[in-house]
Image (spheres, grey):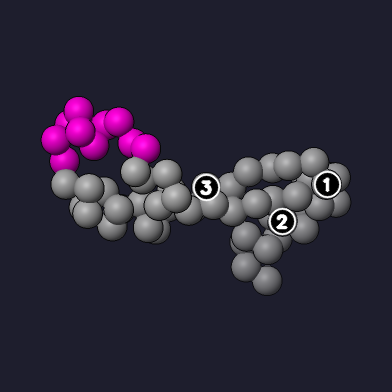
Amino acid sequence: MNIIEHVKQFAQAQGFQVEMFSMLEVSNQLESVSVLKVNLDDVKEMLAATPIFALTLA
């Protein structure tokens, strides 16, 4: 069992669900890209490996 599955099982035992999201889903909403004048493709490459987890009530 990998660590993510272990955490999901623990959270479920406490009455929560764990949902995973990709930062790529919100990459077009990032204000810092234009403020810092960075290349959006470079940012997307970094964000692709960065999942976000949310606990929701089961």
In the image, which residues are magenta? 29-38
Q: Which residue is mark 3?
A: 52
Secondary element under disc 1, as helix, strand or loop, is loop
Residue depicted at 72% across the width and 56% down the height: 8
Q: Secondary structure at mark 2?
A: helix
Rate crowding at label 2 as few (under 14), some (14 to 19) or many (20 or more) other CA atoms within 10 Å.
some
Q: Position of residue 20 (x, y in %)?
A: 59, 53
Category of crowding for the residue at label 1, using alpha-carbon neighbours closer than 10 angstroms: few (below 14), some (14–19), many (at least 20): few
Q: Amino acid at mark 1?
A: Ala
Residue 58, numbered label: 1
Disc 1 from disc 3: Cα separation: 18 Å
Q: Furthest-bottom residue in view?
A: 1
Check disc 3: other Cα within 10 Å, few if <14, some if 14-19, many if 20+.
few
Alpha carbons under labels 2 and 3: distance apart: 13 Å
User: For the point 16% across and 41% down, which residue is it?
Assistant: 38
Q: Earlier in the sequence, mark 1 or mark 3?
A: 3
**Along the viewing direction, whichever of 27 and 5 lies nearer the viewer:** 27
- Give residue 31's quadrant in the image: top left
Q: Where does the image place residue 30, in percent across and percent down from the top left?
A: 33, 36
Amino acid on which the number 3 mark rests in the picture: Ile
User: At which x and y percent is residue 48?
Assistant: 37, 58
Please say if 35 is above or below 11: above
Q: Main secondary structure of the magenta part?
A: helix
Looking at numbered disc 2 in the image, what kind of residue is underneath it? Lys
Which residue is located at x 20 percent, y 28 percent? 35
Checking the image for residue 6, the label placed there is none
Q: Earlier in the sequence, mark 1 or mark 2?
A: 2
Name which quarter of the figure residue 5 lies in. bottom right
Asked if residue 5 is positioned above or below residue 31 in the image, the reply reads below
Badge 3 marks a residue whose secondary structure is: strand
